[in-house]
Image: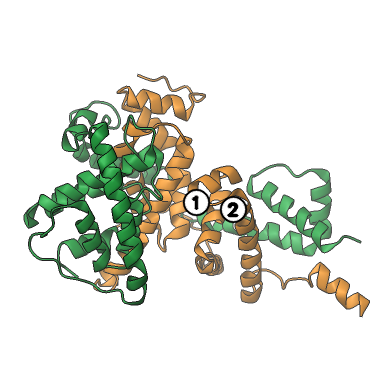
Chain colours: A green, B orange
Amino acid sequence: MMTPVEHEALEQRLIEALAAGEALPADLQAHRSACASCALSARVLELVDGALGADEPDELAWRRFDERLRERLAAESSDAGSATPFPGPPPRAARSEKHPRASRRLRVLLAVAAAAIGVTLLAIVPRLTGTAQVATLPSRLPVTGEAQLIERIAAASEDSVELGLHAQGLSVSSDWAGDDASDDAMESVEQVSAIGMSMATAPAPAWGNVLGEIEEEWGLLPLHQQADLAAILRGES
Amino acid sequence: MLSNDEAETDEALVAAFQAGDASAFDELVMRHRRQIHRVCRGILKSPEQADEACQDAFVKAWQGLARFKGESTFKTWMYRIGMNAAHDMRAREATQARVRDESAREAPILARAVRPSDPVAHEQELGILREAIARLPDRQRETLLLKVQGDLKYTEISEILGCPVGTAKANFHHAVQNLKRQLATSGLIPALPVPVDAAAAGDSE
């Protein structure tokens, strides 16, 4: 008689093999035939696979998808005249001009500033969790530093606290960090600083551009609150 | 210009793109779009939303690929972007849904494959399944999608979702068990048999 633990181990092996599309070894095949519970697990996986592929695009639709993607990338690219199937990569020089890389000394200063921001955020998170409020920002951000800026954003929306925490490098993808630094957190501090300074000094009409830069810099991070943040900064909520 | 060698690795294509060969991105899109689309479809309510999220994901990948350092594989990196794009789309939709007339949706980018033999019952089945998948806790649903649709290893899933490998395994197992219960309740699969341990306990009584 198989124990529950043995059964669960077999079932786990079975569903993993099925999910991976692997051929089942003899013991799993026999178990699948003999065990109604495992047969149902296998059936569930088949159904899931079928359901997700049921309205998959056909070849013609994929061609339209590719065309639309090319159009979008061409619009993004400064190399719109490229004859290649998709436009070339965005020019790196142009990016670095927008956010000139800080010197090592400045980075250290920024790290200190980041630590201060972190402390500030940690202090305000508990207050925000109970009373999420939405603030309307003035036509020009009356701040001069990234610490105040991020604090204001965080204070405007509970969700945006996550942005602030991301800004501390807590969830930053190292692949999305800069080119030549080994310290991911340091890189993210640098990015946040550049963004923060841009936002702090930008007049209201330019916020759209600044937000574009934020999306560019942070677009690959799990920032599910981008839309909310954009609305807040535009004074729409 | 790259050859169309199927054996060219993703990493080689990334390197070629970073060196200025734009056609390498074309090949990367071709390789991964179907899986990314499926994962987006599993997170979003409609195929049209999945189309948009998949587009967004590849635009973001294109924007970021020049700075991709290869510390993860391109595949896991791309899945992470795809999932983030789908979540962002879902958040945007939730916001916009409050003020948008549902009937004024844009035309879909992608036409669906024509399936003349799809009976109504099949559509109902699909609806039940999608609802069941949508009711799963986020992490279970994401793990299920990556495992079933992405054919990813647990180490890759843990990297994408930022969780330990053991957690990914547990989430996948729980997702399957959760779906079994839901689908049995809805009548899509037979009722669950009495669990082994419960049966054993019953025998002993």
Residue B150 in picture, x, y percent from top left = 53, 46
Residue B179 screen position, x and y as percent:
61, 66
Q: Which residue is mark 2?
A: B168
Residue A54, compared with residue A80, is above or below; it is: below
User: Would residue B148 be found to the left or right of residue A16 on screen?
Assistant: left
Tell me whether the residue at label 1 lies in contact with that at label 2, contact meaning CB atoms closer than 8 angstroms: yes
Front position in the image: A150 or B19:
A150
Mark 2: secondary structure: helix
Same chain? Circles 1 and 2 = yes
A39 vs A157, nearest the viewer: A157
| Residue B20 versus residue B105 in the image, above or below | above
Tell me which numbered mark, 1 or 2, is placed earlier along the sequence: 1
- On the image, numbered disc 1 is attached to which residue? B161
Circle 1 — which element? helix
Residue A233: x %, y % from top left: 17, 61
Q: Give the left or right position of residue A96, taking residue B22 as reference.
A: left
What amino acid type is highlighted by mark number 2?
Ala
Residue B106 in view (yes/no): no
Question: What whole-number distance in Å separates the C-alpha atoms at marks 1 and 2?
Answer: 8 Å
Could you tell me the amino acid type at mark 1? Answer: Leu
The residue positioned 8% from the left and 57% from the top of the image is A204
Image mark 2: chain: B
Q: Any mark on residue A107, and which?
A: none
Q: Is residue A195 left or right of residue A61?
A: left
Mark 1 nearby-residue class (10 Å; few <14, some 14–19, many ≥20): some
Q: Quadrant of the C terminus of chain A?
A: bottom left
Q: Is residue B103 visible?
A: yes
Residue A187 in the image: x percent, y percent?
Answer: 32, 39
Q: Chain under label 1?
A: B
For the point 82% across and 54% down, the residue is A31
Looking at the image, which residue is at 79% across and 70% down? B195
